[in-house]
Image: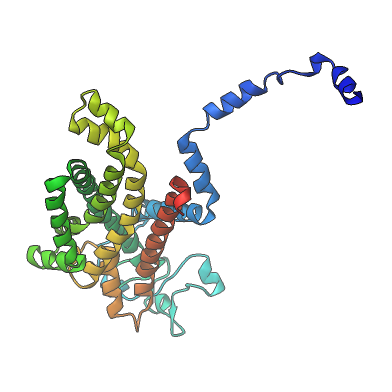
Amino acid sequence: MAQESEVASIPAADFGFAQGHEEEAEREYANYSYVREIFNRFMDNKGAFVSLVMIVLIIVLAIVAPMLSPYKFDEVNSTRSNLPPRVPGLEQVGLFDGTKDGVNVYAEKGISEEYHYFGTDSLGRDIWVRVWYGTRISLLISLIAVVIDIFIGVVYGLISGYFGGRVDIVMQRITEILSSIPQLVIVTILLVALGPGLGNIVIALAITGWIDMSRIVRAQMLKLKNMEFVLAARTLGASWREIIFKEVMPNCLAQIIVTFMFSIPNAIFFEAFLAFVGLGVPAPISSLGTMINDGYKSAMVYPYMVVGPVVVLGLLMLGFNLFADGLRDAIEPNQS
């Protein structure tokens, strides 16, 4: 009885909604979108954030460094051949001071005002400029090839999964035949037949690179095509094109984006490998693979010729893989 009297004695004015809090919560929730949620999860991943910064820095250097340098990527100067790295500022503390085997090569050749950050090759071309120009070419080739792969793979997978039946059986047998042959073998044979060149490399990389994307998109289509929103669109008279590209494909964007990011380092590696075995872009155009091939021949005597392109290639592949991994965890946290 005493407890009931205490409760009864509490004024009714003490009960009520906190003024303004519900409106503030509604405004905060309205501004909290799905994209913002992905962004916050991605930024919480320190490794993914560092990889993004690294990728952006490499891309900026690939664009800006050849433009700001006084040297050209194809400028041959036999009097400047085989110069070791020399960096202003660091040379004062004994690092990258242009010496090799205790001899200042720059002073020996009477060069006082020139600096080559990565040194020069056997033809006197500045390796710093060639590395960043080659990075630009490697990124361009891989990006074009991956975009073509994504387009073919998405369309192929969506159509195969939506129609099913005989259409799906025939289309999947084609992908199985193509995937049974190693991609490296197909690409190498095509380049031997077509010859080296930017366009031919892109075509060779795009021949079989779409298979993984088509399988991922087909699996998503098989999962989504019998869901309520697709059945409702079909009931309302939507055509198969509208169902595929307006209803189902937007729900596959997360998987498409993640696969796209994972495909870029794979394409960069293939381009570098082809260039390393002599099937890359023709001279005087440089890519990371051609520079590694050129530097490898003199690596025992002039190791700096191969260190620069190898480090940039390794950072590119590591950065894109970490970025794609972090993006996947941000988009699909339950799958990590």
Horizontal relation, residue 44 to residue 66: left or right: right
Which residue is more in the foreground, 140 or 251?
251
Q: Position of residue 155 (x, y in %)?
A: 20, 43
Percent x, y of residue 270: 25, 64
Q: Is residue 61 above or below residue 298?
A: above
Instruction: Specify the quadrant that holds the N terminus.
Output: top right
The reply, left or right, for residue 48 in relation to residue 204 is right
Q: Between residues 336 and 118, which one lies in front from this camera angle?
A: 336
Q: Is residue 28 among the parts visible in the rendering? A: yes
Residue 32 at x, y percent in the picture? 52, 32
Residue at the location (19% across, 67% down)?
A: 182
| Location of residue 116 with respect to 175 vertically, above or below | below
Foreground of the two, 328 or 49? 328
Relative to 279, 246 lies left or right: right
Which quadrant would residue 121 be assigned to in this image? Answer: bottom left
As drawn, 226 above or below 106 = above
Q: How many marks?
A: 0
Which residue is at the far right?
2
Name the image colouring: rainbow
Residue 272 in the image: above or below residue 323: below
Query: Image quarter for residue 233?
Result: top left
The residue depicted at 27 percent of the width and 66 percent of the height is: 272
Q: Residue 54's x, y, as percent?
A: 45, 56
Q: In this rendered view, identify the residue nearer to me: 17 or 190.
A: 17
